[in-house]
Amino acid sequence: MNALTREFVDGLSAEKNEPAWMRAHRARCLEVFGKAPLPRFGPDLSELDFSDLAYYARPVAPVKRWEDLPDEIRRTFAALRLPEAEQRALAGLGAQVDSEVVYRSLLDAVRSQGVIFTSMDTAVREYPWVEDYFMKVIPPEDNKFAALHGALWSGGTFIWIPPGVEVAVPLQAYYRMQTEAVGQFEHTLIVAEPGSSVHYIEGCSAPRYARSALHSGMVEIFAKEGAKVRFTTIQNWSKNVYNLNNKRALAHAGAAVDWVSASLGSKVTMLYPTTVLLGPGARTENLSFTFSQDGMWLDSGARALHRAPDTTSRLISRSVVQGSGKSVFRGTVHVSPLARGAKAHVECSTLLLTPDARTETIPILNAETDDVELGHEATVGRVSQEQLFYLMSRGLSEAQAMSLIVNGFVSPILKEIPLEYSVELKGLLEMSFEEATG
Amino acid sequence: MPVLVVDDLHVAVGGKPILRGVDLALEPGRVHALMGPNGSGKSTLALSLAGGPGYEVTRGRAQLEGEDLLSLPPFERARRGLFLAFQYPPEIEGVSLREFLRLACAERGQGFCEFQRNYPQAIARLRMEPFDGRELNVGFSGGEKKRAELLQLYLLKPKVALLDEPDSGVDVDALRLIAGAIRDLADGGAAVLIITHYPRILDHVPPAEVFVLDEGRIVERGGPELARRIGEEGFEVVRG
């Protein structure tokens, strides 16, 4: 447990041997945090006790090889098949436990293209120009958790893709919260220079403890002219985690930013990935799948801010709600007067599996020019007894039938997720139905 | 030896009695027909045997190879070899026909290699090549759904196949395909029960035995000639 004081934050900065700008930045963020109110919408956060959290924890020292990790962590990563994925399907992999990155690798072929893939802490020490990007898309004044993150951030990923370089296979980071009542505040910053492309995947998990933990990460993406960035998140936090994140991208002319996410865990999630379409022809897609189970409140959404002509956004969500879970989807599209010829499509569908399941969809579509095409669809449905019976009459158990119907419902999102992960997601879904139907 | 025996079956739906004591037996390798006017309880019989939700068995028994069927959940009935081809199969979005069939065949004990071999053959037999990559029943016409039911039947190789109006909404060419597939099934040893209003399909698949259901009871039994008589004179022949 640490008190949230100036001394603590200064000490963290000194410990990390940070440049003066970062030390000043942390101090400013702490001040903003103290004054900022909790969000005035969404889930109840009153049980989140800021005085009961470990704001920095380093239970594991960094290693060069998987074998050198402590047994428990090594077994966890092996069960998640991270070393396997690293060999087969990834250009680079980072793994963080609590506050610090403990393992990182990058293929030589990718390194020799000039790609930088390192921990955020290292980047802040080694590249002074990082100051031009760090929390420039999401300033601490944006919201209380952005400010908290800015004061306490530790670990995370820094990626720089040189102009014109296309990284063919994904880069991945895995986040693990290991210590009870820990706070994890990793910062991810992706700078894709003109004409470059990259696919980044983040995954996360935590063991379940009685006390609540807080995850408040931040992702900032700069997609320069014609760059393509795809950001995939597989979120499987345990059900004692408050997952309150900020994710935002700037898309310059002709750039494309895609957010793909599958959220299966956490007690409370608040997450609204945002793309600012800054340059003509920029486009964004947000494909979101949430699975709210008993006692969970997943409050998610997507925002597209059209600031230039001929920009395009597509915000698609599929929510599945089980037990007493709740899902909220906030789809926001704002088109400024400059953004003539903008096209936006918002589509959210919810499948309720139980009588207690709750859902809300809150679309906000706002255009300040007439020259736009806006589309919006929302549906809420239940699994029909007829469909269940039909599948069961072919020999599938109730859990299999349910999981097939749910998989089908979320297939528009699942098919965008790399195969290794979508197979695992299907497995997780089926497991939860086995539990639910006995 | 009959494979399926239904004995004094009474079924209510929403508290209202629909079946009032049905007795019938289906023999392996044989095609049977269940005929009857609208509302006589034909679909109720099929759905209660398959374990449909809302069909309350108030009396009687049904046995598959001597084992009580009615106490089993629907998927256990299917795994023991009962198949119901639905009159109106529901659409299941996002689930591919092939993936679904692979799962269902695995539950019937068929290995992956066996499925990989059988699936293209079954698709070819029912001329369903254009449907291979499609989602289960999604956007299929009425006739296409019937063919897809037969495709499932063909792959799952049940011991007892209940076909609820496999001919409705089907054109002549598809009717021939469907009839051919039903004959194959019976030739392969399955007990088949075709439920229909019209004797049309029975011209293509002559039944060994015809049951006529009216007001929840079997009121007449006979050979193929009974189906022809009903075709010519209507259900009046079995009434009064």
Image (cartoon, rainbow, N blue to C red):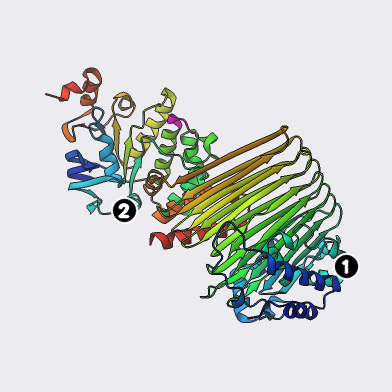
Residue at 66% across, 71% down = A184
Which residue is situated farthest in the left direction here?
B240
Q: Is residue B141 magenta?
A: yes
Tell me which amino acid carries mark 1. Answer: Pro
Position of A86 relative to B34 (above/below): below
Q: Nearer the viewer, mark 1 or mark 2?
A: 1
In this picture, residue B121 sits left or right of residue A30? left
Q: CA distance from mark 1 to mark 2?
A: 67 Å
Residue at 62% across, 66% down = A204
In this picture, residue A207 sits left or right of residue B240? right
Q: Dot 2 corresponds to which residue?
A: B73
Mark 2: give few (<14), some (14-19) or many (20+) Cα within 10 Å.
some
Which residue is situated farthest in the front direction here?
A35
Position of B77 relative to B137 (above/below): below
Asked if badges 1 and 2 are on one and the same chain, I answer no
Mark 1: give few (<14), some (14-19) or many (20+) Cα within 10 Å.
few
Work out whether residue A140 or residue B103 is closer to the camera in this orientation and state it.
A140
Position of B240 relative to B16 (above/below): above
Q: Is residue A81 magenta?
A: no
Residues at discs 1 and 2 in contact (Cβ within 8 Å): no
Tell me which amino acid carries mark 2. Answer: Pro
Which stretch is magenta? B140-144
Question: Callout 1: helix, strand or loop?
Answer: helix
Position of A90 relative to B135 (above/below): below
